[in-house]
Image (cartoon, helix red, strand yellow):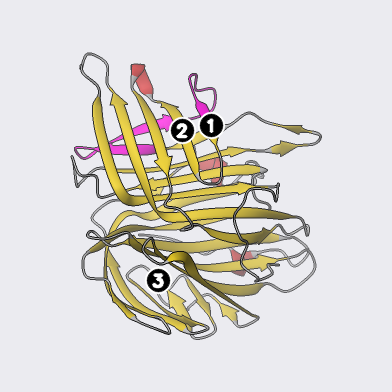
Amino acid sequence: MSVAPVFPNASQRAGMYESFYLRAVSPDEPLGVWIRYTVHKRPGEPARGSLWCTVFDARRGRPFQHKLTTEQLSAPPSSGWISIGAATLGPEEARGACGDASWALRFASSEPALKHLPRSWMYRAPLPRTKLSSPAPAATFEGTVELPDRSLSLQGWRGMVGHNWGAEHAERWIWLHGIDFAQDPDAWLDVAIGRVRVGRWTTPWVANGVLSLGGRRVPLGGLGARGLLVAETAKRCRLALPGPEGFSVDAHIDTPTDAIAGWAYADPDGSQHDVANCSIAALTLTVKQPGLTPARTLSTTHGAAYELGMREHDHGIAIAPFPDG
């Protein structure tokens, strides 16, 4: 998992953001964690780091959420990726504390990193303004998360580790990750879909990601892909994701009542998105492969993460009282 943090080399005059994050979900019950280490930098100002901790439990309703922001931000000199205060995240472990929550986690993955953008030059070019990759798109976690009222033991929980950065967020975006499918425990899905603001115009949806089946990664979406359909709200979503040579995936995502975390995400220019994330979502995939009938179904009752970033505020999701930026 060769990952280089971007923020240490950011121009003093430029604005930028960067996020390292992980999600892990229990194999037995609708219980999951989502932890983020983020950098936010406005033009001409020093960068600040934030720790975000969310714990989802469908049996308890609203998720546990807390966020801590500090100027104690650095890139570890050895093999770590980011340090915020005393919290660290690197290629094999995550440690930290955020309010009344703390975690000590180790993770491993036999999967190579996933680069969502199809061309290497896109990671060096000014456009797209948002870059993303998954250093560990299918990982296994061990360790503990301590909460004010209980301790979670993450023994063999499945999930992923992600990384994104850029000059600004997409105008609107969806992130979908799925793992622990009942019909194929080794399959996983990782796809990002976005609309980008260009002057007065907003582009159509563009998807980039893969579905991994039988050790083979099938690319989904891409610039100019035909057949992409998106129907989304903060609580559920339906997607038609085109692949190569007639391959396609229909995805149906649904979230447990009240088990959605709402956060405010700021852009370096001071604007803001509301973000709804549920990391214990239900996901059903209908996979159509050329020459094979009937279509294949993959489903997980709570192994998916569904995130929607949006400008509107009338989505019905409570936004946590932690400012960003």
Disc 3 element: loop
Of tags 3 and 2, the one toward the viewer is 2
Q: Residues within 10 Å of mark 3 (few under 14, many from 20)?
A: many
Residue 231 has which mark? Answer: 1
Circle nearer the N terminus (3, 2)? 3
Query: Tag 2: residue type?
Result: Arg
Query: Tag 3: residue type?
Result: Gly
Disc 2 element: strand
Q: Is residue 10 magenta?
A: no
Determine which quarter of the picture holds residue 103. Answer: bottom left
Q: Residues within 10 Å of mark 2 (few under 14, many from 20)?
A: some
Distance between the alpha carbons at the discs numbered 3 and 2: 34 Å
Query: Tag 1: residue type?
Result: Ala
Residue where numbered disc 3 is placed:
90
Q: Relative to 320, is 162 above or below?
A: above
- Which residue occupies the foreground of this view, 123 or 250? 250
Q: Is residue 219 magenta?
A: yes
In which quadrant of the rendered image does the N terminus lie?
bottom left
- The percent coordinates of residue 84 (x first, y second) are 54, 79
Q: Is residue 137 left or right of residue 185?
A: right
Q: Mark 1 touching mark 3, by CB under 8 A?
A: no
Disc 1 element: strand
Can I make out residue 117 in this image?
no
